[in-house]
Amino acid sequence: MNELLLIMGMMLVTLAIRYPVLALSGRLKLSDWFLQLLRYVPPTVLTAIVVPAVLMPTGEELSLTLANARMVGALAAVTVGLWRKNLLLTIAVGMGVFLLWQWGVVAAHH
């Protein structure tokens, strides 16, 4: 029951923060440079979330070794993404390399 109250509270706080901006969005005229600047927000936030998870898989220390399957999968995904410019292929290759590396290379060393 406490979890449900916590989720409802988080929902209300999120709504309270975002609703005024959404309600006024049709009335506000934002400058072109500001709108262009906003295009960089999603990739920046995604990078801030993904990079620590990839480079610090245990959450404690930096892991830049081939035993880090997340890093190997991410490198494969970045390579395919830059080469092919295909989001679905990038995700599939990144996940595939991560899983194969995790099950093959990392599991063999433990």
Image (cartoon, rainbow, N blue to C red):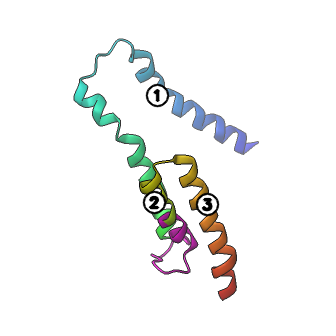
Name the kind of residue labelled 2 in the image: Val
Q: Position of residue 104 (x, y in %)?
A: 68, 78
Which residues are drawn in magenta?
57-75
Secondary structure mainly formed by the magenta segment: loop
Tell which of 27 and 50 is nearer to you: 50
Question: Decide: marks 2, 1 in contact (CB < 8 A)?
Answer: no
Name the kind of residue labelled 3 in the image: Met
For this view, does 25 lie left or right of residue 8?
left
Which residue is drawn at the image coordinates 56% and 61% (left, top)? Answer: 94
Count residues near mark 1 (Cα–Cα under 10 Å), then give few for <14, some for 14-19, many for 20+: few
Find disc 2 in the rendering and name its residue. Answer: 78
Question: Decide: marks 1, 3 in contact (CB < 8 A)?
Answer: no
Secondary structure beneath dot 2 equals helix
Nearest to N terminus: mark 1 or mark 3: 1
Q: Quadrant of the N terminus?
A: top right
Find disc 3 in the rendering and name its residue. Answer: 95
Find disc 1 in the rendering and name its residue. Answer: 18
